[in-house]
Every structure is written in C-alpha cells, then in structure tokens.
Image (cartoon, rainbow, N blue to C red):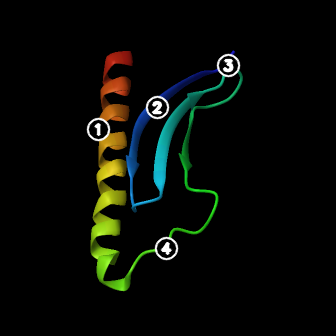
Amino acid sequence: MSKSTILATGRITAADIITVTYVEPGDSPPVVFIRWPGQPSVADPLRLPAVANAVMGVLTAAITKLAAIRAAGL
C-alpha cells in the first residue's frame, strides 16, 4: 500500500499549476513527483523572472514540508 502526500502546489503562469507530491510505496523507496502541465507553459519573455520565482516558490514550499515530514519520522 502506498501513501501520497501533496508537498506543495502553485500557479506558475496565468494558466499553469504545478504540484509536488511525496509518494511512499510499500515495496520500494520513497519518490517525489513533480507534476507539470500537460502542455508547454507559455509566458511573455519579460515575465520569465516571475515564472521562475513562482516555480522556485512551489519547490521551496515542497522542500520545507518534506523536511518536516522526515524530521517527524526520525
């Protein structure tokens, strides 16, 4: 039996959301899934820094939550 925990989710463009999930399968080591939109994300070149910041914000939140999960398990 596997256990899944959403670590973070967030909008990276006006139309695109990414989700980071921690999956603990019963029969193999844990993994992290980063779910990107099914289609390419499109942004104005001037908005690229904002998109990159949004992506990093979601990943930072995921790292923080994963660290808390791992600390609680120790």
Within-10-Å neighbours for mark 2: few <14, some 14–19, many 20+: some
10 Å crowding of disc 1: few (<14), some (14-19), many (20+):
few
Q: Residue at x 51, y 33 (%)?
A: 22
Is 74 above or below relative to 29?
Answer: above
**Pointer 1: what residue?**
64
Residue at mark 3 to residue at mark 4: CA–CA distance? 38 Å
Q: Amino acid at mark 1?
A: Thr
- Looking at the rendered image, the disc whose residue lies closer to the viewer, 4 or 2, is 4
Residues at marks 3 and 1, CA–CA distance in whole angstroms: 24 Å
Q: Disc 4 and disc 2: Cα gap in Å?
A: 25 Å
Residue 19 on image: x %, y %: 48, 44
**Residue type indicated by callout 2:** Ile
Q: Earlier in the sequence, mark 1 or mark 4?
A: 4
| Type of the residue with mark 3 | Gly
Give the x, y percent position of residue 63.
Answer: 34, 42
Q: Can see residue 74?
A: no
Quadrant of the image occupied by residue 43: bottom left
Q: How many numbered circles does the render carry?
A: 4
Residue occupying the point 34% across, 76% down: 48
Q: Nearer the viewer, residue 2 or 54?
A: 54
Q: Is residue 18 above or below residue 3?
A: below
Residue at figure coordinates x 37%, y 58% from the top left: 55
Q: Secondary structure at mark 4?
A: loop
Residue denoted by label 4:
42
Q: Secondary structure at mark 3?
A: loop
